[in-house]
Image: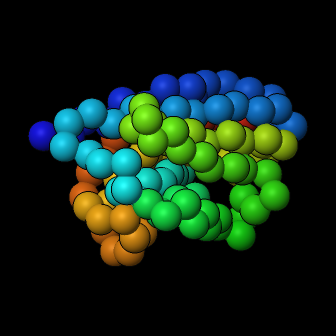
Amino acid sequence: QVQLVESGGGLVQAGGSLRLSCAASGSVFSANGMGWYRQAPGKQRELVASVSGAGTRRYADSVKGRFTISRDNAKNTVYLQMNSLKPEDSAVYYCAVWRYDVVFGTPAYWGQGTQVTVSS
């Protein structure tokens, strides 16, 4: 049984910053791929950032240069530092963990989601 507990969402003005955290517990190993998706109303869920078990990071074009994903393997925690936030970043953000070290296909585990709202 794997549980993902997210925190750090909220309301922020455009240009501001937020840091999301996702703590994984249960049968999750430090080598698992981890990442963040987001879903805005009426839109498909999209992969925003990911980090493989080997530490390879990837970002959606829309957030490159503004968002940074990191992980603390000792704590089984993944973070998403979001800077220079824009109203279009508003969405529910979901933590995701893949079954293996590579980030490929559908994640095996999902968090409950945390709302991020960026006001203009």
Residue 50, relative to residue 76: is it above or below?
A: below
**In the shown orientation, is residue 102 left or right of residue 10?**
left
| Quarter that holds the N terminus | top left
Where on the picture, by quarter, is residue 83? top right
Please state which of residues 31 and 79 is positioned toward the viewer in this rendering: 31
Where on the picture, by quarter, is residue 59? bottom right
Q: Position of residue 105 (x, y in %)?
A: 34, 74
Please state which of residues 91 and 105 is positioned toward the viewer in this rendering: 105
Where on the picture, by quarter, is residue 116? top right
Please state which of residues 53 and 2 is positioned toward the viewer in this rendering: 53
Please name the colour scheme applied to the rendered image: rainbow
Residue 42 appears in the picture as rendered: no
**In the shown orientation, is residue 58 left or right of residue 44?**
right
Residue 53, relative to residue 117: is it above or below?
A: below
Residue at the image point whose x is 26% and y is 61% from the top: 99
> In this figure, what is the number of numbered marks?
0
Q: Position of residue 17 (x, y in %)?
A: 77, 33
Residue at the image point whose x is 43% and y is 35% from the top: 74
Residue at the image point whose x is 43% and y is 54% from the top: 34
Q: Position of residue 109 (x, y in %)?
A: 26, 51
**In the shown orientation, is residue 109 left or right of residue 32?**
left
Residue 13 appears in the picture as rendered: yes
| Quarter that holds the C terminus | top right
Q: Position of residue 107 (x, y in %)?
A: 31, 61
The extreme bottom residue here reads: 105
